[in-house]
Image (cartoon, helix red, strand yellow):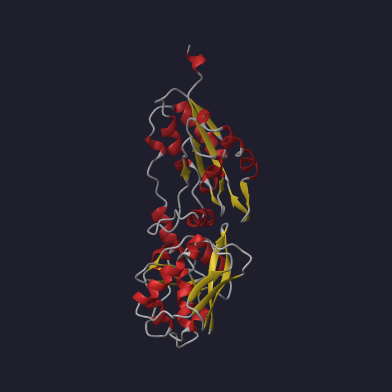
Amino acid sequence: MLAKMNSACVLGVDAYKVVVEVDIANGIPSFSIVGLPDTAIRESKDRIRSAIKNSGFDFPTKRITVNLAPADIKKEGAGFDLPIAVAILVATNVLETEKFKEYIVCGELSLNGEVKSIKGALPIALSFSKTRENRFLLPFENIQEAGIVNEADIYPIHNLKEVIDFLNGLVELKPQKINVAKLFRKNSKYRFDFSDVKGQEHVKRGLEIAAAGSHNVLLIGPPGSGKSMLAKRLATILSDMSIEESLETSKIHSVAGLLSARKGLIATRPFRSPHHTISDCALTGGGTYPSPGEISLAHNGVLFLDELPEFKRNALEVMRQPLEDQTITISRVAGTLTYPARFMLIAAMNPCPCRLN
C-alpha cells in the first residue's frame, strides 16, 4: 500500500516542502530510504522501527520503500523520523481518517517514541505561514520559536502515539500561539550594559559615534586596558531590534540549532566573539551541507575579533566580500546558499612592541 505525508526541510534560511512517500509491498523484509538523504536520515530506520514498536504498534515485516520528494535536492537532519513513521502507520491502516493530509509534520523520534526538537522550526513555520498548508505538527520543544508565527497553526506533540490518537480523533490538541510582543520584551535584556564602564571617556565617545553610524572599529591598547570589556557592551547602545530584524536573526540561529527552547526569539543584538584559531570555513560558514558561520550568526549585531594579528590570513581575507555586500554566498557540491551577514566589526589588538620602546 502507498501512503504520503507532507513534511518540510530547511535550505539556507528558508524551507521547502518535502513529500514523504511510503510503499509497503510483499517480499523479503527490507527498509530503504531514497531521495538523496544524508547519514542522519539513513540511520533513522532503526529509530523508527523501535519507536513504532515501543508506542504499541506493529512494525510491518515487509518490503518498505521510502521516497523523499523532490528527489533531486539533498535532505538533511532527523526531522523526517516522525513523518516517515506516521506514513508507515498510514500504509498499514492504523489511521482511520485522512486528516493527516491537512498537516505538515516534522520531528525526531527517540527509541521510546518521544518526539525531540528539530533545527529550523521557525523558518519552516514562516515559509508556509501564508499558504494553504499552514497547519503543523511540531515537537513541543519547538513551540516557543514556531508559535510566534501567528499566521500558522502550530500543534505541539510529545510522542508518536499522541500524533496517531490526534489524527484518529481520539485526542484533542489546540494550536499554540505565542504573544510576540510579550516575548520580545522579555528577551530584550542584555547581560551587560555600556553604563557599567567608568572612565575611558575618549574610547566611549568613539564607540558611541561608531554605533550611531554602524562603523567598524579597531581598538588598540595594552593588555588590561578594557578593550574586550568595551566591545562586549557596545551592542547595548545600538538601536533596539525591530520585529523584522529579530525574526531574521532568529531564523539563522534556528537553522544552526542555537535557538534555546525557552527563549524562542532573539530580541537583543547578537555578540559573537570567535577564538583567533577559527578557520575561514567556520567564520564564513560551510561544510558538506552549508551551514551559517560566525559572520552570519552575528547578523544585525556585533562580531568581535580579539587579538586581530593572531587570526589566520585566510580567515581575514574571506571577510572582504561579506563586509561590502552584507551577504555571504557559500558554494559546495551539495549546492549554493546565500546567508545574510550585516554586522559591525570590532577588532582589538595590542600595540606593536616597537611603539613601547
Spot occupied by residue 309 in the image (x, y as percentages of width and height): 52, 28
Whether residue 97 can be seen here: yes
Residue 278, relative to residue 224: is it above or below? below
Where does the image place residue 44, in percent across and percent down from the top left? 45, 67
The residue shown at (37%, 82%) is: 171
Is 112 on the left or on the right of 304, as rendered? Answer: left
Q: Residue 225's quadrant in the figure?
A: top left
Of the pair 113 and 225, the residue shown nearer to us: 113
Q: What residue is at 38 percent from the left and 67 percent from the top? A: 110
> Looking at the image, which residue sits at the far top?
357
Residue 100: x %, y % from top left = 49, 80
Q: Residue furthest front?
A: 28
* Residue nearest the observer in this picture, 260 or 88: 88
State the count of labels. 0
In this view of the protein, which residue sits in the foreground, 334 or 252? Answer: 334
Q: Look at the image and tell me whether residue 137 can be seen.
A: no
Examine the rendered structure and indicate whether residue 71 appears above or below residue 172. above
Residue 173 picture location, percent across and down: 39, 78
